């Protein structure tokens, strides 16, 4: 989000028919480089980059517009032709006002062409040749040091303009000339430079992306080259060093060298949110504090963190002769894979280097209100440092009125570091100008605003070069150099800037994006569902870690204003939904059950590259069937796994509906429940035969018992009744005994 003063720096474009004058922000090379050739010549092969159908006329002072007493004034003037018609040759007149501008508000009005007519005196002329369609012409104008126009000028910021007559009127481009004061007290200044990889949708950079970005002409290399040797304050996205460190020994050599440089340079720095995620959107989504990465386990392989183990040498009493020569590639150590516990921790992966200031937050420009600042101030740091929030001066009452705001302030209960919106916007513009003859315009604008700021401030100043991407080391270095080489300033670290006296500030004109807050809320809700789903893994961070990293990248400030962001966001949410659907029961069909028992077979689909732990819960809708309620499953990765559920039929015949639900060991439902119809045909024949056998057995036993008892009774009766002959013999014997006289033998 741009500051309210940004429109003042927007170029004024005109069509060929109107031939109206415009000023386009540009950049020139540092003063020593241009002083040798103050009259640059156009390149015949170069083409104009202005919008089709427009022309742009630009005045770019050399040396950032600074003219010390006794120095000459050198400028370049250029015409870019984006029309299909050739522009006729033009005589350009350079004019200077000898009355300095009163304040930075007057400077803004002058630069954007809204000020009242000022009294200017012509001080030089030159002729620009005809400009062919799609081309440009550049000329230089120099005013000698002893020219009366430069004599006797007091310190200040003077209006400077270049113009040429056109068929319709006069085309004009405005700029400024700065005469620095002598003997002024230097003011501390901090220049914040982001070290980022641009908008990303994946949590970490790949090896291929790192190789490209850290190549000699890569964006990350250009950023580090631009700040090396300067006192710039680095705002480092921790996702960049983390992307290199997770690759271990497999990281590209250029990336490892880049990381070593980042860790070696002594610039003060602070860590941005991972992926330069927008803290405002997160807090407005209802989060208690900004999100942090949770785990990078999914990105790392133990084989890339092997520790070389020396090859043991056998002990011997005799000295071992030393070979005269050995192959240069002969291995002396063997890599030893390390356990997961040997992998670097999350904190180790996210370190951004020495002299890091904790608790510094840089929301998207113009989005942090008092509530956001207060909530950030409540987040404790490990070293007890008071958190600070970086905000643009244009969102403060003083800054919106065109006044200078010192760097260290207080909004409500939170401390802030205020960066000057006008200076920062001009430096950002300059850092993205490829042509040196265009770069001088925004650099002069930044220097002119800085001259007023240095004279007005009551504490250190803070500026940034913006969050631009694709900047070369020359462009970025020129912007940083312009800030530090401005008159009466001296570099300061972020700790020094934050140590100054804090002045109370009021905010105004803060605008946040409900769209981004809604997106953050939706992403966090999806992440919560994924975290529940991830309980099916032995290591849930294999899913939750990359998801958190992806979310932070998608909330990156670099996506603001990118028309493709809604599509990228939608694609990510669709991918998350696909992950949640990656494990499920395959559709089932009705089946028949014959017999008393069987094992019903079902299939579990697992599209994840990891094995998953599940429990299949099975329930019935009637008592015709007994079923195993819980069946543990380990589903193999990227395949379908068969599951067998034992069932037992009861007496009865009919339909039974089984409800199947997969759950994680933590009882989280996985996928939608499935229902299957089972037609039960109970085994009645077996039951009937068994029952008849029991009856027959009982009858048989009863018959046998009855027969045995009858035989026993019969035998008992035969034993107690004498035979008929025995009875008669007994009677006869008795008679003979009774007929014998007493005393006589029979």
Image (spheres, grey):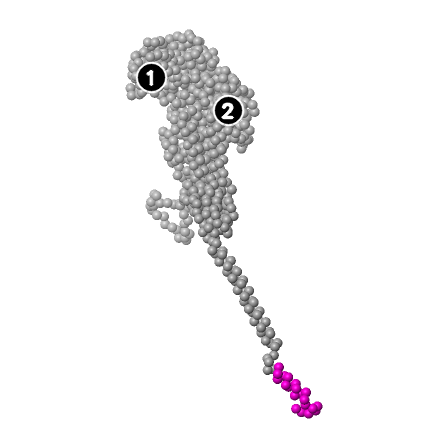
Residue depicted at x 60% and y 74%: 717
Q: Farthest residue toward the right?
A: 742
- Quickly name the residue at label 1: 53
User: In this orientation, which residue lies closer to the viewer: 419 or 625?
Assistant: 625
- Asked if 196 appears above or below 644 in the picture, the reply is above
- Asked if 705 appears above or below 236 in the picture, the reply is below
Around disc 1, counting alpha carbons within 10 Å, would you say few (fewer than 14), some (14 to 19), or many (20 or more)? Answer: some
Residue depicted at x 48% and y 19%: 394
Residue depicted at x 40% and y 21%: 430
Q: Is residue 623 magenta?
A: no
Q: Quadrant of the N terminus?
A: top left
Mark 2 to mark 1 CA distance (whole Å) = 39 Å
At which x and y percent is residue 157?
44, 13
Q: Nearer the viewer, mark 2 or mark 1?
A: 1
Q: Is residue 74 visible?
A: no
Report the magenta residues as a range.
727-746
- Quickly name the residue at label 2: 368
Q: Is residue 736 magenta?
A: yes
Q: Of helix, strand and loop, which one carries label 2?
A: loop
Majority secondary structure in the magenta region: helix
At which x and y percent is residue 278?
47, 28
Around disc 2, counting alpha carbons within 10 Å, would you say few (fewer than 14), some (14 to 19), or many (20 or more)? Answer: many
At which x and y percent is residue 66?
41, 16
* Occupied quadrant, residue 465: top left
At which x and y percent is residue 486?
44, 19
């Amino acid at each position: 989000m741009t500051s309210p003063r940004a429109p003042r720096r927007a170029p004024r474009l005109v069509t060929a028919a109107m031939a109206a004058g415009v000023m386009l922000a540009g950049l020139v090379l540092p003063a020593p480089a241009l002083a040798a050739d103050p009259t640059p010549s156009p390149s015949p092969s170069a083409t104009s980059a202005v919008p089709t159908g427009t022309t742009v006329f630009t005045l770019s002072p050399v040396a950032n517009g600074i003219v010390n007493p006794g120095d000459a004034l050198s400028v370049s003037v250029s015409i870019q032709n984006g029309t299909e018609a050739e522009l006729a040759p033009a005589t350009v007149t350079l004019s200077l006002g000898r009355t300095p501008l009163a304040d930075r508000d007057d400077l803004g009005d002058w630069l954007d062409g809204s000020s009242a007519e000022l009294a200017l005196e012509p001080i030089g002329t030159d002729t620009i040749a005809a400009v062919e369609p799609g081309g440009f012409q550049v000329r230089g104008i120099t005013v000698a040091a002893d020219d009366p126009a430069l004599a006797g000028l007091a310190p200040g910021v003077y209006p400077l303009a270049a113009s040429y007559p056109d068929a319709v009127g006069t085309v004009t481009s405005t700029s400024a000339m700065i005469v620095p004061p002598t003997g002024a007290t230097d003011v501390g200044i901090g220049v914040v430079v982001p070290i980022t990889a641009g908008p990303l949708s994946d949590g970490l950079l790949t090896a291929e992306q790192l190789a490209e970005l850290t190549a000699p002409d890569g964006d990350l290399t250009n950023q580090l080259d631009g700040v090396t040797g300067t006192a710039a304050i680095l705002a480092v996205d921790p996702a960049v060093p983390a992307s290199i460190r997770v690759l271990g020994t497999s990281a590209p050599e250029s990336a490892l060298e880049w990381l070593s440089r980042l860790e070696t340079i002594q610039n003060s720095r602070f860590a941005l949110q991972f992926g330069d995620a927008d803290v405002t959107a997160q807090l407005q989504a209802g989060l208690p504090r900004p999100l942090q990465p949770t785990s990078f386990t999914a990105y790392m392989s133990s084989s890339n963190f092997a520790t070389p183990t020396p090859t043991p040498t056998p002990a011997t009493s005799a000295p071992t002769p030393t070979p005269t020569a050995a192959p240069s590639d002969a291995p002396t150590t063997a890599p030893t894979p390390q356990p997961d516990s040997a992998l670097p921790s999350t904190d180790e992966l996210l370190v951004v280097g020495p002299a890091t200031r904790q608790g510094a937050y840089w929301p998207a420009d113009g989005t942090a209100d008092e509530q956001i600042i207060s909530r950030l101030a409540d987040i404790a740091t490990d070293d007890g440092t008071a958190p600070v929030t970086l905000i643009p001066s244009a969102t403060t009452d003083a800054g919106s009125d065109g006044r200078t705001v010192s760097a260290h302030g207080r909004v409500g209960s939170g401390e802030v570091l205020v960066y000057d919106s006008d200076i920062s916007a001009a430096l950002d513009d300059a850092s993205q100008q490829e042509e040196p003859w265009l770069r001088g315009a925004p650099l002069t604008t930044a220097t002119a605003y800085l001259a007023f700021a240095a004279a007005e401030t009551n504490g250190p100043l803070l500026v940034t070069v913006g969050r631009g991407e694709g900047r070369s080391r020359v462009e970025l270095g020129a912007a940083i150099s312009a800030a530090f080489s401005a008159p009466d300033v001296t570099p300061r670290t972020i700790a020094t800037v934050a140590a100054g006296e804090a002045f109370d500030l009021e905010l105004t004109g803060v605008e946040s994006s409900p769209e981004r807050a809604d997106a953050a809320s939706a992403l966090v809700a999806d992440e919560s569902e994924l975290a529940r789903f991830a309980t099916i893994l032995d290591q849930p961070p294999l899913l939750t870690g990359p998801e958190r990293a992806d979310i932070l990248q998608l909330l990156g400030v670099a996506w603001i204003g990118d028309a493709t962001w809604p599509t990228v966001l939608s694609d990510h949410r669709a991918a998350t939904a696909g992950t949640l659907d990656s494990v499920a029961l395959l559709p089932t069909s009705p089946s028949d059950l014959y017999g008393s028992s069987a094992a019903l077979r079902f299939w579990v689909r697992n599209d994840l590259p990891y094995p998953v732990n599940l429990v299949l819960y099975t329930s019935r809708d009637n008592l015709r069937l007994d079923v195993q309620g819980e069946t543990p499953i380990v589903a193999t990765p990227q395949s379908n796994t068969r599951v067998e559920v034992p069932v037992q039929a009861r007496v009865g015949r009919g339909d039974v509906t089984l409800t199947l639900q997969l759950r994680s060991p933590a009882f989280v439902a996985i996928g939608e429940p499935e229902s299957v119809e089972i037609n039960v045909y109970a085994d009645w024949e077996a039951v009937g035969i068994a029952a008849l056998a029991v009856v027959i057995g009982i009858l048989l036993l009863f018959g046998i018992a009855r027969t045995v008892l009858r035989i026993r009774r019969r035998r008992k009766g035969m034993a107690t009744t004498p035979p008929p002959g025995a009875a008669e013999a007994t009677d006869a014997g008795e008679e003979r005994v009774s007929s014998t006289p007493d005393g006589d033998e029979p």
